[in-house]
Image (cartoon, grey):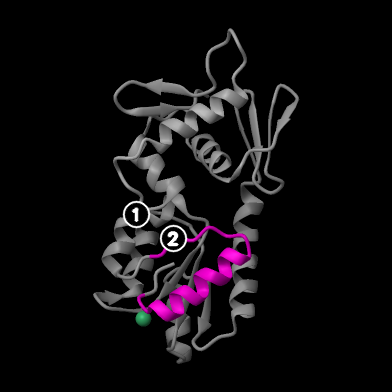
């Protein structure tokens, strides 16, 4: 979520978390640009009037970088022309402030459903992961992974064969403001290996020394 007003932001974050979403929040155009919104998030809720500029810059930045992440714009602007130009610019939906949380929640559900419909089932090597049912399986055995482990594996599976730096994994799975000195990525990779590895066989997750990790195709 890109929203500078604390009161509105905490109201929305609280509500979306209660609906089962994980939410990262930034408050400026610059932070939004730095956050890599396109690659790591299923939806962007975007306020237009930000302290350092216009939310449209964030939307344009995303579309220019070929990100098709759904964008839901929040704004007090009500002119039809504004709505049309936002949709033309690549926004997926638009909600006028003030709004009822129920309506925001319904639109978020609709937009993330559309997103998920395209990418329900991920398959890499022997692993499969269903983002809808949250079931992970390998060689016919099913695993029920806790939240962060599931998110980490999902991110690895969305980037098969790529070397992923620890910092990139931290940003993607734990959020943009996480302590960069943390060894939490290594700990969670260990958890995943303990669950998914088979004794005497190579690990499902490769260590790339000095850099990070890779999930072989
Ligand atoms: Ca604002």
Residue 104 highlighted magenta (yes or no): no
Query: Outermost residue toward the bottom?
Result: 79
- Label 2 crowding class (10 Å Cα cut-off): few <14, some 14-19, many 20+? some
In front here: 114 or 163?
163
Residue 38, given in percent of the width and then of the height, sits at 42, 55
**Magenta span of residues:** 4-25
Corner quadrant of residue 114: bottom right
Residue contact between numbered discs 1 and 2, judged by CB atoms under 8 Å:
yes
Residue 17 highlighted magenta (yes or no): yes
Say if 145 sits above or below 110 in the image: above
Residue 32, given in percent of the width and then of the height, sits at 33, 63
Say if 213 sits above or below 148 in the image: above
Residue 84, given in percent of the width and then of the height, sits at 47, 82
Name the residue beneath numbered marker 1: 177
In front here: 186 or 69?
186
In front here: 70 or 109?
109
Say if 31 sits above or below 66 in the image: below
- Label 1 crowding class (10 Å Cα cut-off): few <14, some 14-19, many 20+? few
Name the residue beneath numbered marker 2: 24
Query: Residue, x 34% and y 67% (percent of image)?
Result: 58
Labels 1 and 2: the sequence-earlier one: 2
Query: Outermost residue toward the top?
Result: 200
Q: Is residue 117 visible?
A: yes
Q: Provide the secondary structure element on which disc 1 rests.
A: loop
């Amino acid at each position: 979520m890109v929203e500078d007003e604390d009161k509105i932001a905490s109201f929305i974050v609280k509500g979306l978390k209660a609906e089962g979403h994980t939410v990262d929040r930034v408050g400026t155009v610059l932070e939004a640009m730095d956050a890599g919104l396109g690659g790591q998030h299923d939806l962007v809720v975007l306020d237009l009037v930000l302290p350092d500029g216009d939310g449209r810059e964030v939307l344009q930045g995303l579309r220019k970088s070929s990100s098709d992440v759904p964008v839901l714009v929040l704004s007090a602007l009500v002119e039809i022309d504004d709505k049309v130009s936002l949709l033309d610019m690549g926004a997926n939906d638009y909600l006028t402030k003030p709004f009822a949380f129920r309506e925001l929640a319904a639109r978020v559900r609709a937009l993330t459903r559309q997103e998920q419909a395209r990418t329900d089932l991920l398959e890499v090597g022997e692993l499969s992961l269903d983002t809808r049912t949250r079931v992970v399986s390998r060689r016919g055995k099913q695993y029920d992974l806790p939240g962060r482990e599931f998110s980490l594996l999902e991110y690895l599976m969305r980037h098969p064969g790529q070397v992923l730096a620890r910092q990139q994994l931290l940003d993607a799975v734990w959020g943009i403001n996480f302590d960069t000195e943390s060894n939490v990525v290594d700990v969670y990779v260990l958890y995943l290996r303990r669950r998914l590895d088979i004794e005497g066989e190579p690990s499902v997750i490769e260590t790339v020394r000095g850099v990070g990790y890779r999930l072989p195709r």
